Amino acid sequence: MGVTDASAAARPAPDARHACSASTSLDGFSDALDKTLFHGTVVGNLSGLAVDTDGTVAALSDRSQLFSLKVDRHLAAAPTRVVPLADEKGAQLDSEAVVVDRDGSRLITSEIEPSVRRYDRDGHLLGRLPVPDALRVAPAGRALSNATFEGLALQPGGRTLIASMEAPLAGDAKDTAGRTLLRFQTWQRESAKGEFRLAGQYAYPAEPNAGVSEITATGDGRLLVLERGFTAGVGNSVRLFLADPRGASDVSGVASLPGGARVLRKTLLADLAACPSLGAKAKQPQPNPLLDNIEGLAVTGRTRDGRLRLLLVSDDNENPVQTTRLYALTVRLPRHV
């Protein structure tokens, strides 16, 4: 797919008719996976994406399933494998985000506790990372149920892992612009093969009526952040931001935000409602029929002129009025946030 150099070269040059913004273009979309089965398993509820070490795409279902997908440059997607996941007691996860480590193991979040667990390629549990007490779901902590570790990113070099909370902790307030302050938790390790240990925590300012549904590393120390909201009768809002954690203050010791925190700086790359619909159809009201419940995001490669190629996926929740849809975008990152 677009994860290989050969297919990236075969992609057409950007077309102004595909522009979502000055920096971002929509290369295409595909509904080929919608309401399909693979070996009796529903190919849906997809909430996380990551490029695997073999060039396939790891596609995570929030129903404790991890698919391997072959995706070509036209977004034709074919599952080649599905692996079930479970916690230490054999119970299902509310699995939301995945990254593939350099050794091929998978780091996967679950919103239930929340947690970050490591699995091998066959879905065997290898370990679990520590999580601060405050980020645990109430009453154990201050987090809201079903609103915890929605995104996960591994920074270049493999030594820094970042998980993004979908919603704020109880007691955290908005900033002066009315933006919701969400906590991004990090872990550090001494080497790319070492064990992750708890590290800094940072405040991210999400737009009003939106939460963070995914984050991914850009390769230069910054993050792509997908913000998503939903209004009944109106539909989804989906915006792509570039954020820079460098310069943000550690808020792990701050009981209530903002508390004088220097938040992550961010800049809007594209409002996906402004993208061309390219003939997409929506099964429920949407500002743009292209939109759905977009939750997964991965960088799949670069163009010859340095733009990032992105793959996005929507979570259909096995709902007849929602769609499992893949999106291919190309984005040119600004030099500064």
Image (spheres, grey):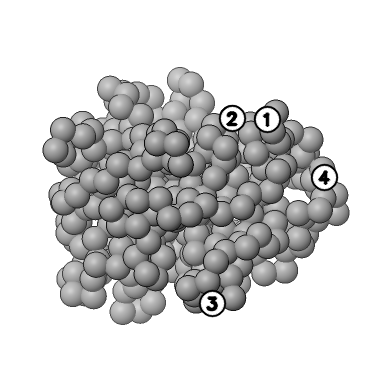
Q: Nearer the viewer, residue 196 or 245?
A: 196
Task: State how far apart marks 1 and 4 are (Cα).
Answer: 15 Å
Residue identifier under label 1: 138
Residue identifier under label 4: 255
Q: Residue drawn at (43%, 55%), measured in percent from left and top?
A: 126
Q: Is residue 233 visible?
A: yes
Q: Specify the quadrant that holds the C terminus.
A: bottom right
Instruction: Using a 10 Å C-alpha cutoff, classify the residue at mark 3 as few (fewer than 14 neighbours), some (14 to 19) or many (20 or more).
Output: few
| Circle number at residue 145 | 2
Q: Position of residue 93 (x, y in %)?
A: 43, 37
Say which label, 4 or 3, has the lower sequence index. 3
Say which label, 1 or 3, has the lower sequence index. 1
Do the CB atoms of the residues marked 4 and 2 lie less than 8 Å apart?
A: no
Task: State how far apart marks 1 and 3 are (Cα).
Answer: 34 Å
Task: State how far apart marks 2 and 1 are (Cα).
Answer: 7 Å
The quadrant holding residue 85 is top left
Say which label, 2 or 1, has the lower sequence index. 1
Q: Element under label 3?
A: loop
Say which label, 1 or 4, has the lower sequence index. 1
Q: Nearer the viewer, residue 8 or 139?
A: 139
Task: State how far apart marks 4 and 2 are (Cα).
Answer: 19 Å
Q: Amino acid at mark 4?
A: Ala
Q: Element under label 4?
A: loop
Task: State how far apart marks 2 and 3 are (Cα).
Answer: 34 Å
Q: Amino acid at mark 1?
A: Ala
- In the depicted structure, whether residue 232 falls above or below residue 198: above
**Residue 86 appears left or right of 211:** left
Q: Nearer the viewer, residue 239 or 78?
A: 78
Select label 2 or label 3 by which is in front.
3
Q: Element under label 1?
A: loop
